[in-house]
Image (cartoon, helix red, strand yellow):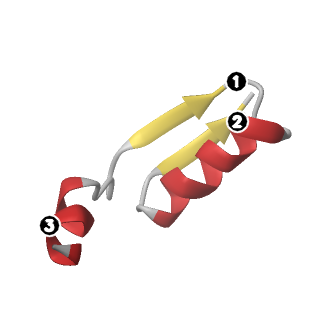
Amino acid sequence: MSGFWNQAFDLTGRCAVITGGAAGIGLACAHLLVERGARVALL
């Protein structure tokens, strides 16, 4: 099942913009997106 989740949440080549990413939930989301391969911009 682990392979399914890795493919389902592969964000390689995707971009994300996160507002409020300096701390808390925004920062946690940014870390997760980067781990999954996304390019992240924090505002």
- Mark found first going from the N terminus, 3 or 1: 3
CB of mark 1 within 8 Å of CB of mark 2?
Answer: yes
Q: Earlier in the sequence, mark 3 or mark 2?
A: 3
Q: Amino acid at mark 2?
A: Gly
Q: Which badge, 1 or 2, is on the more N-terminal residue?
A: 1
Which residue is denoted by mark 2 in the rendering?
26
Q: How many marks?
A: 3
Residue at the location (32% across, 58% down)?
Answer: 12
Rendered position, 22 above or below 2? above
Label of residue 3 in the image = none
Residue 4 is labelled as 3
Q: What separation in Å lies between label 3 and label 1 (alpha carbons)? A: 29 Å
Q: Classify 10 Å Cα crowding around label 1: few (below 14), some (14-19), many (20 and above).
A: few
Location of mark 1 (residue): 19
- Badge 3, how many Cα within 10 Å: few under 14, some, many 20+? few
- Label 1 element class: loop
Closer-to-camera residue (38/27): 27
Q: Is residue 15 left or right of residue 42?
A: left
Question: Residue flagged by tag 1: what amino acid is it?
Answer: Thr
Label pair 3/2, CB-CB below 8 angstroms: no
